């Protein structure tokens, strides 16, 4: 059964469920799922807020979060059945889909929140040139990133291409997932440049770095501007067999997006950030002050989906949106 047929069946089942039971209440249980994501990372903020605020329970769904260290582990969990929904990137899923596996995206995750930071004494002769001409200064430099073979490496390669550079023009240094690891490597002089992600900038002190490129603020010509980093996803088989669970997950996710984007909920969101990232209140607040626009919506529109092309590994192709995006879920956001 192909993905499009699976989604059509799931959409029909969800629609039928809603018509037959329009007055569903929080007391009605639709089931339990395990959500697998990155431990200690803000990539799962929407789902963590939904758990903390009882938004899944409001729709009759019990969700337990479990952490993993890589996209490959999460994909194996979804396809193997040890988790029902989790974080996925097209970097991981495109090769799986090419080999015949069927995975469906439910909601968008955060958009990119990266900036390029350089050592304070690093010579950057093109620093005053506009983006992406200033990126030619990356040639010959050592760049810190979380891990090799990840979506972040694909983003770096896309940026290099904009500057007319090749991946072999730089040396990528994997420092591990936590931002603290990258900051430690940066402070020790092991790298020249850091592809900074939360909470790198909150951990660094003034004078410990200089901006090479504020990528979050540059739209024109920037291939990673507002790029969706991850999706919440499930296997097509699970989506087909459990339409009521998928409906509850999607409705709660929509509620969570609205919750985090309501300024009235600022303090509660910061508390969740403190919890999932093990931060003190001041650092969590600084994080939210900088990145609060990173979760605009759970909708996966055609334009944002098409941008995923830059994240694909070699020889992988981006499936058509309607083949991999669960439209019934989108309609419930």
Image (cartoon, helix red, strand yellow):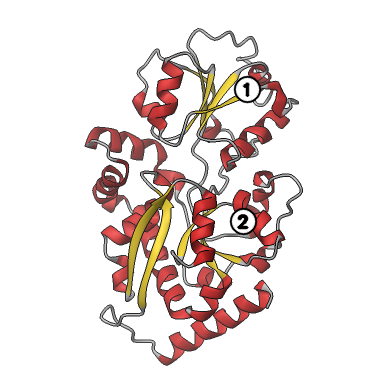
Mark 1 secondary-structure assignment: strand
- Identify which residue is drawn at 48% across, 79% down: 243
Quarter occupied by residue 98? bottom right
How far across and down, in percent of the image, does residue 293 sit? 43, 45
- Identify which residue is drawn at 43% across, 53% down: 37
Cα separation between marks 1 and 2: 26 Å
How far across and down, in percent of the image, does residue 112 sit? 52, 41
Q: Residue furthest bottom?
A: 20
How far across and down, in percent of the image, does residue 10 sit? 55, 80
Q: Is residue 232 visible?
A: no
- Identify which residue is drawn at 65% across, 45% down: 311
Q: Which residue is the site of mark 1?
A: 171
How far across and down, in percent of the image, does residue 198 sit? 41, 35
Quarter occupied by residue 3? bottom right
Q: Which residue is the site of mark 2?
A: 93
Please report contact status of discs 1 and 2: CB closer than 8 Å, yes or no: no
Position of 40 compared to 297: left or right? Answer: left
- Identify which residue is drawn at 46% across, 73% down: 246
Q: Could you tell me which quadrant the N terminus lies in?
A: bottom right
On screen, residue 49 above or below 210: below
Q: Is residue 46 visible?
A: yes
Q: Earlier in the sequence, mark 1 or mark 2?
A: 2
Disc assigned to residue 321? none
Quarter occupied by residue 310? top right
On screen, residue 218 above or below 27: above
């Amino acid at each position: 059964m192909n993905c499009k047929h699976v989604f059509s069946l799931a959409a029909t089942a969800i629609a039928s469920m809603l018509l037959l039971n329009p007055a569903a209440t929080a007391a009605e249980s639709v089931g339990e799922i395990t959500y697998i994501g990155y431990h200690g990372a803000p990539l799962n903020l929407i789902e963590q807020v939904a758990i903390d605020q009882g938004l899944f329970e409001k729709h009759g769904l019990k969700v337990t979060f479990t952490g993993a260290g890589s996209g490959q582990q999460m994909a194996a969990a979804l396809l193997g059945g040890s988790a029902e929904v989790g974080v996925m990137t097209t970097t991981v899923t495109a090769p799986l889909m090419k080999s015949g596996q069927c995975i469906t995206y439910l909601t968008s995750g955060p958009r990119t929140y990266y900036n390029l930071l350089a050592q304070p004494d690093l010579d950057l002769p093109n620093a005053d040139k506009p983006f992406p001409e200033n990126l030619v200064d990356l040639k010959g430099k050592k760049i810190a990133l979380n891990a090799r073979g990840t979506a972040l490496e694909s983003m770096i390669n896309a940026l290099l291409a904009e500057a007319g550079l090749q991946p072999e023009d730089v040396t990528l240094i994997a420092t591990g997932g936590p931002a603290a690891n990258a900051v430690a490597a940066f402070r020790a002089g092991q790298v020249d440049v850091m592809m900074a992600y939360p909470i790198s900038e909150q951990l660094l002190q003034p004078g410990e770095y200089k901006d090479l490129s504020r990528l979050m603020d540059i739209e024109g010509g920037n291939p990673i501007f507002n790029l969706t980093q991850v999706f919440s996803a499930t296997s097509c088989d699970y989506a087909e067999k459990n339409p009521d669970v998928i409906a509850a997950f999607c409705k709660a996710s929509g509620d969570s997006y609205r919750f985090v984007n309501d300024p009235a909920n600022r303090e509660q969101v910061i508390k969740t950030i403190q919890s999932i990232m093990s931060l003190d209140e001041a650092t969590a607040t600084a994080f939210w002050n900088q990145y609060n626009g990173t979760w605009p919506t759970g909708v996966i529109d055609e334009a944002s989906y098409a941008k995923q092309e830059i994240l694909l590994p070699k020889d992988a192709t981006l499936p058509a949106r309607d083949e991999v995006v669960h439209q019934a879920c989108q309609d419930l956001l």
